Image: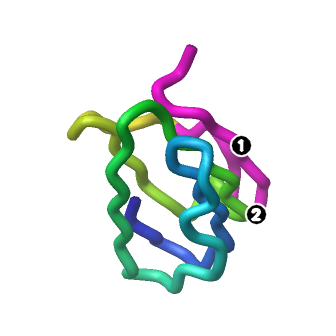
Amino acid sequence: MVADQRTWIQVIVDGKNTETGLLEAGETRKWRAMDKVGLVVGNGGGVRLWWDRKPVEISSRRGRVVRLTLPRP
């Protein structure tokens, strides 16, 4: 994940809360999962995301909360 704008995130990797907090513009985060990743992004239009090196489309406008589970069912 790369933050293009300031955003709040919550990340749950394989059922365990891994990270909760603010990302500033320009910050990057990586996580490894055996099964799945749950994400809550407070500014869905302010981040870019990849899963298995492939871009994930986040259909959201700036300031909208987005909830995702990867891989997508």
* Quarter of the figure with residue 73: top right
Horizontal and vertical percent position of residue 59: 62, 36
Dot 1: within a 10 Å radius of its alpha carbon, few (fewer than 14), some, or many (20 or more) residues? Answer: some
Return the residue at label 1: 67
Q: What is the quadrant of the N terminus in the image?
A: bottom left
Q: Main secondary structure of the magenta part?
A: loop
Horizontal and vertical percent position of residue 31: 37, 57
Horizontal and vertical percent position of residue 18: 55, 64
Residue type at mark 1? Answer: Arg
Residue 61 vertical placement versus 72 (above, below): below
Return the residue at label 2: 63
Task: Kindly report the distance in space between the C-alpha atoms of the residues bearing marks 1 and 2.
Answer: 13 Å
Q: Secondary structure at mark 2?
A: loop
Name the foreground residue: 44 vs 35.
35
* Quarter of the figure with residue 23: bottom right
Query: Which residue is found at the position 43% from the left and 54% from the top?
Result: 48
Name the foreground residue: 71 vs 18.
18
Instruction: Tell whether 24 sits left or right of 43.
Output: left
Name the foreground residue: 20 vs 68.
20
Residue type at mark 2? Answer: Gly
Query: Which residue is found at the position 39% from the left and 65% from the top?
Result: 2
Instruction: Tell whether 10 sits left or right of 49.
Output: right
* Numbered-mark total: 2
Residue 72 vertical placement versus 8 (above, below): above
Q: Which residues are magenta?
A: 58-73
